[in-house]
Image (cartoon, rainbow, N blue to C red):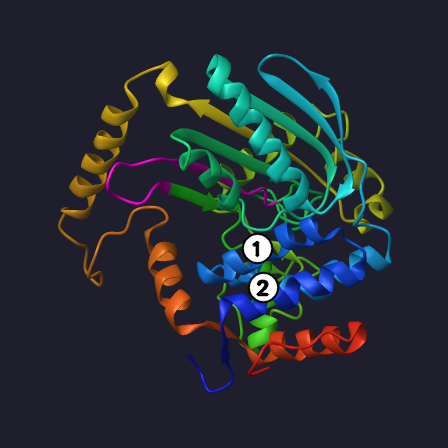
């Protein structure tokens, strides 16, 4: 932790976050869900998707782009699928609802798949896939928004850096959980760099004119992970979510730049009942075995340990649960402004 960071305990930070969203107009139970998802990300070290998002969410509510009291509707439903209109709901509120429903479907017929239209930022996607893994299911979640990433070979935004998360349960180990953007670095990491007052690595982003930059304040266009692989995945995720929902977000923005000014997104969440295919206990034991085998591999030069997906975040969660969540100076300053505006008491230490 640097001298410009302060540590805050989980309970007080979550209580503060909940109260801010109540003041914004959310029902208390929805505000609690939103606060839990944001603080959970901070606990896992995913600060780019944690409480630094609060001022942005407040701004989006003020602009009418996030709806604190949405009318969430199931538009279509089959035994295995749901098509949900989110009415610009806060992402965690509608995504929790959707994942619970697809898990119910999976427990009955083996699989559940939900397509969510017109929601807003969902936070860290692993939160939802782990809901399935903790119930002995495999979870999948992905999301698309308007373009913010350059396709391979371009120097202008043409796809979204669509994240995907996949989680599966283990027996004695923690669940395996992958949560990754299709960009080299998630967009929230640029916000975090601004809050910390530090440069970003070369290769993360371009400025508005398509030039490479290490200044997080100038970075506007993300770069795809793995070149054509990252941008190819992102394009296909648009096909599985936004276009399938009848709410395309890439082509309309590329042909009418003004349509890219508004925050909105579409998402898919799915659950798979492992027991529909194999013995659950045996499956979880095999997951333990593959984790153990990978961690027993010889390490490459410069590495002390081989990590599996989700392991660094689990260790961070344990540390921050004991010692508090570090917040950089810029995030603290922004949260103080929010607290003053809504007359909400800051957590101790801020």
In the foreground, 74 or 233: 74
> Residue 100, percent across and down?
57, 32
> Residue 310, percent across and down?
37, 49
166 inside magenta stretch: yes
Q: Residues within 10 Å of mark 2 (few under 14, many from 20)?
A: many
Task: Count every numbered label the image shows and give the total.
Answer: 2
Tell me: 100 left or right of 253. Answer: left
Q: Main secondary structure of the magenta part?
A: loop
Inter-mark Cα distance, 1 to 2:
6 Å
In the foreground, 71 or 218: 71
* Magenta stretch in the rendered image: 161-176
Task: Report the residue marked by disc 1.
Answer: 36
Q: Which residue is depicted at the point 69% across and 42% down?
A: 145
Residue 219 visible to an observer of this rendering = no
Q: Are marks 1 and 2 in contact (CB under 8 Å)?
A: yes
> Residue 47, percent across and down?
52, 63
Seen in the picture, residue 188 relative to 89 is either above or below; the reply is below
Q: Which residue is depicted at the point 53% across and 66% down?
A: 11
Task: Report the residue marked by disc 2.
Answer: 14
Q: Residues within 10 Å of mark 1 (few under 14, many from 20)?
A: many
Residue 101 visible to an observer of this rendering = yes
């Amino acid at each position: 932790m640097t001298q410009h960071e302060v540590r805050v305990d989980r309970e007080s930070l979550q209580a503060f976050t909940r109260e801010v969203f109540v003041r914004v107009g959310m029902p208390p139970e929805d505000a609690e869900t939103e606060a839990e998802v944001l603080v959970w990300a901070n606990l896992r070290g995913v600060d780019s998707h944690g409480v630094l998002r609060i001022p942005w969410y407040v701004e989006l509510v003020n602009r009418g782009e996030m709806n604190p009291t949405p009318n969430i509707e199931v538009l279509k439903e089959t035994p295995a699928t749901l098509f949900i209109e989110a009415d610009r709901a806060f992402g965690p509120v509608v995504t929790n609802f959707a994942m619970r429903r697809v898990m119910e479907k999976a427990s009955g017929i083996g699989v559940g798949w939900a397509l969510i239209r017109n929601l807003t930022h969902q936070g860290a996607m692993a939160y939802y896939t782990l809901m399935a893994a903790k119930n002995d299911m495999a979870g999948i979640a992905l999301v698309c928004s308007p373009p913010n990433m350059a396709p391979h070979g371009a120097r202008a935004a043409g796809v979204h850096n669509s994240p995907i998360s996949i989680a599966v349960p283990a027996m004695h180990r923690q669940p395996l959980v992958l949560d990754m953007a299709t960009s080299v670095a998630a967009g929230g990491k640029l916000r975090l760099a601004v809050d910390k007052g530090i440069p970003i690595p070369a290769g993360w982003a371009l400025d508005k004119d398509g030039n490479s930059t290490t200044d997080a304040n100038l970075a506007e266009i993300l770069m795809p992970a793995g070149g054509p692989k990252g941008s190819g995945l992102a394009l296909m995720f648009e096909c599985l979510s936004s276009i399938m929902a009848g709410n395309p977000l890439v082509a309309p923005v590329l042909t009418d730049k003004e349509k890219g000014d508004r925050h909105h997104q579409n998402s898919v969440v799915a659950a798979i009942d492992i027991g529909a295919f194999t013995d659950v206990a045996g499956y979880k034991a095999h997951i333990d075995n593959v984790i153990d085998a990978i961690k027993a591999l010889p390490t490459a030069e410069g590495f002390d340990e081989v990590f599996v997906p989700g392991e660094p975040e689990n260790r961070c969660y344990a540390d921050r649960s004991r010692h508090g969540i570090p917040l950089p100076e810029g995030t603290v300053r922004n949260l103080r402004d929010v607290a003053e505006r809504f007359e909400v008491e800051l957590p101790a230490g801020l």
